[in-house]
Image (tube, rainbow, N blue to C red):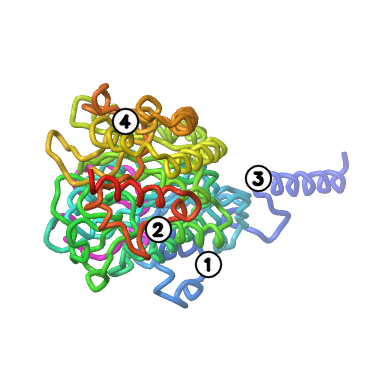
Amino acid sequence: MNLKRFLKISILFFLLSTLLFTGCTGGCSPTESYGNLDGYVYVKTGDVRIHVRGLLEDIESDPNVYRVLPGATVLIDNKTATTNSNGYFKITQIPAGTYSVSISANGYETLTITGVTISGGQTTHLQQNVSLARRKWNFLVYMDGDNNLESYAIMDVNEMEQIGSNQDVNIIALVDRIPGYDTSNGNWTTTRLYYITQDSDTSTINSTLLVDLGERDMSDPDTLRDFVIYCQNNFPAEKTCLTLWNHGGGVYPRSYSKDKRSSVSYPSSIKGGARGLCWDDTTAVAYPWNCLTTDEVAAALRQARAQTGKKIDVINMDVCLTQMIEVAYEWRNEANFLVGSEATVPGNGNDYATVLQHLTGNPNMNAQVFAKTLVDDYQSYYNGYGNTTYSYVNLGAPFTTLMNSFKSFAQALNNTSDLASVDNAWQRYTTNFGYWNGYRYEYLENLDLYDLADDLSRLSSDGAVRSAANSLKAAISNAVYYKNTGIYAGSQWPAYGLAVLLPSDAEWSYYSGSDRYVMLALSQDTLWDEFILRFVAYESTH
């Protein structure tokens, strides 16, 4: 081999070796095969999603909306960094290539960004617009603790935190408090929106605070409407359960007991208190009826559905005495299932830890299965303790059949000349809900509808009444699922899951009037209120 050929081969070998071991064909150094990644991590007010931008000025335009997130962990190619007080991070010496980047922080949704390119000798500024993944369920709690139930509100939020939201279930609570009852958790008394996260502390609320709204009136239907719209729009989910949490007292409007223009709800160890539901003792003291009425709830949910295009799948009423046919009919177009109690509800209310354990453990359950789960869990929680009822009403086709039967029942009673048998059933046989652990309360006008129909199917001398009563019993059995404890589980005071108003003459004085019971949809569409007028006239003279 001559010298000239030897030199050519040597030069070619050197060039190939350089390309193989450095990735360069000339002029570059080995360090240029590595790059860097940086960015500013932030969150938006009222949002659990993490966002990231390449420049700080991108998130400084509105500090009321954008908030930097210190302490977040950024991970790429087994390299990590923690954001500083400005939300900034930088990771260096990342081999050139394409990666997935994850950003996580306690109480927030982990953000994963795919297809991030790292170029040799350059810094990639991470930037991403994100959207929240659609969950299986939203579990929304409208928690009005702005009254003497404040301490129970704190307890129930901590119960929810034992489970917390997960990849399938969003748990979101709007919580209002009041001065003077519970000083824990910083003794804040405003209205806060929380994204419930898991922790083992049973006394301190550690969930993600989405926003502090200041003082809001929980008895204002607009507050309920806005809560539902916000959650449905910002936390998309296939199905939604809305829990109404506070005092309850049966059908309202416009049902007063004693002087219902009192500005505070009555102290009580149960969730009976004053009539209506969701009493706000701070903001609404200037109003004559500082609670949500039956028709106001329907209006709020109707407006929310118009904005979001989504119907509530399950309404769960953690309030007293509200599982009534009048309420179900008023809300029939705004939910698929209505869950609640004919009777009073203990202050502890639902067993949220168990309910949410079942929901998060089986997020694919449909609305009917979850409604049944709420009923079963309630009965299990209070079995052996007190006298409780809990039920769900299927507001679909079964309820349509039920209402057709009820209309015939109301018409037959309004036409009957045998009011004596009605009075007999009302006074002696039909279950009412005026008892709590042996003590008599003043809700005696709420009667179990199935039990009333059953009594009249035996006692009435009017064939039309007996026939209508039997049809109504069958329809209730098809539309209602119930579980009871205590006296309501026995034969003396049976409860079948759905109550109706049938007051005495004295009790009717709290319901009568042009702006009260007659304003309900059930009064407008059936002859039940006309029958009540006949009955109270008869009852007052016998």
Residue 390 relative to residue 13: left or right: left
Label number found at residue 23: none
Determine the secondary structure under disc 1: loop
Determine the secondary structure under disc 2: helix
User: Which residue is at the front of the view, 342 or 277?
Assistant: 342
User: 10 Å neighbourhood of mark 4: few (<14), some, or many (≥20)?
Assistant: many
Question: What's the CA distance linking mark 2 and mark 1?
Answer: 61 Å
Task: Verify whether residue 195 appears in magenta.
Answer: yes
- Magenta part of the protein: which range? 183-210
Q: Nearer the viewer, mark 2 or mark 3?
A: 2
Question: What's the CA distance linking mark 2 and mark 3?
Answer: 88 Å
Q: Badges 3 and 1: C-beta atoms under 8 Å apart?
A: no
Question: What's the CA distance linking mark 3 and mark 4?
Answer: 83 Å
Residue carrying label 1:
54
Q: Residue 364, position in %: x, y? A: 52, 33
Mark 2 or mark 4, which is nearer the start of the sequence? 4
Amino acid at pointer 1 = Gly
Residue 117 relative to residue 263: left or right: right
Q: Is residue 417 above or below residue 184?
A: above
Amino acid at pointer 2 = Val
Determine the secondary structure under disc 4: loop
Amino acid at pointer 3 = Phe
Mark 4 or mark 3, which is nearer the start of the sequence? 3
Residue 43 in sight from this viewpoint: no
The residue under the point 68% across, 61% down is: 27
Residue carrying label 3:
21
Residue carrying label 4:
495
Q: Quadrant of the C terminus?
A: top left
Question: What's the CA distance linking mark 1 and mark 4?
Answer: 63 Å
Residue carrying label 2:
518
Q: Residue 236, position in %: x, y? A: 53, 51
